[in-house]
Amino acid sequence: MQTGTSNKSTENGTQLPRKTTACGAAYFEVGEGEPLILIHGVGMRLEAWAPQIEAFATTHRVIAVDMPGHGGSVKIAAGSTVRDFVGWFGRFLDDIGIARANIAGHSMGALISGGAAATFANRIKRVAYLNGVHRRDPAAKAAVLARAAAIRTSGVDTAGPLLRWFGDDPQSQRARELTRAWLEAVDPEGYAIAYTAFANGDETYADCWPSVTCPALFLTGSGDPNSTPEMAEQMASLTPNGWARVVDGHRHMVNLTAPDSVNVLMAEWLNCREESA
């Protein structure tokens, strides 16, 4: 492995130091104990998990990874699907020598985490699905496909996500500005590949939840217009050891805008016995 260098930070917007696997996946690692792997969403980077990295580094071996084409990770092939991203994640586990881990994903990262729990269940101890989608309705499906098509001609949109993901409350201001900076810095091709997979991936593993037997947390914000509370509740109802939690008054970037609430819920999930939720 190669070790990158940069200034360590948590919530101040600067980069955390990265290591890079032989296959080009960049990640940050801190702490000791049971592994907790964090996967961010489209347009973001591993620093989007800063409040969770700081909170759980005292109890777990926390590994936050840059999704392909984001942060320091090399791009995945054009035309890749959610299944290809899940395959990439399995190779990442191999590269860093992790046999079994807790995995939490946000948005596109949630699709990857859910796919991992469905595809190689023996390697997933617990799964957390934050602000993830499930069987979009026709209007939402049409809207996300239109946004994916627009990326190919107009590039990365920063204004639209900020409007959808954040309210006007003062506590969201810092998270909004960090998110704006990450969207402006993302590799356009890497973003387009991931967003297209995300737009087409809401049903890829939708039928798999009844077979996911590990503890599964489905968490979202009450005001998230795309990863709705109804979606979280539907997935939880299908999953043998699944439960839904909704953070009132927050939207898509709930782990940044309501970190204390999210950290409490994730701590409960991490302390949940595997055989029961």
Image: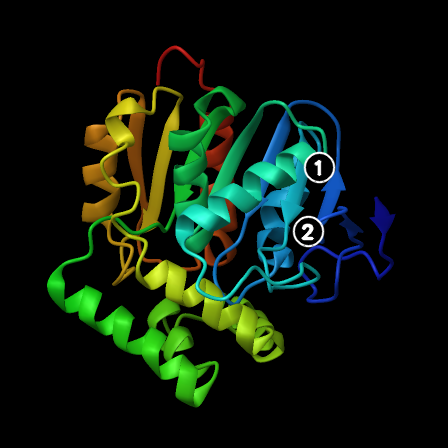
Q: Secondary structure at mark 1?
A: helix
Image coords of residue 156 (percent x, y) = 48, 81
The amino acid beneath tag 1 is Asp
Q: Residue at x 22, y 47 (%)?
A: 231
Residue under label 2: 25
Residue under label 1: 95
Are the residues at dot 1 and dot 2 in contact (C-beta closer than 8 Å)? Answer: yes
For disc 2, the neighbor class at 10 Å (few under 14, some 14 to 19, many from 20) is many
Instruction: Quadrant for the C terminus, please.
Output: top left
Q: CA distance from mark 1 to mark 2?
A: 9 Å
Image coords of residue 250 (percent x, y) = 35, 58
Q: What colouring method underlies this structural image?
A: rainbow
The amino acid beneath tag 2 is Ala
Instruction: Quadrant for the N terminus, please.
Output: top right
Image coords of residue 80 (percent x, y) = 45, 58
In the figure, residue 90 lies in which quadrant? top right
Q: Residue at x 39, y 38 (%)?
A: 114
Q: Residue furthest bottom?
A: 154
Image coords of residue 24 (percent x, y) = 72, 53
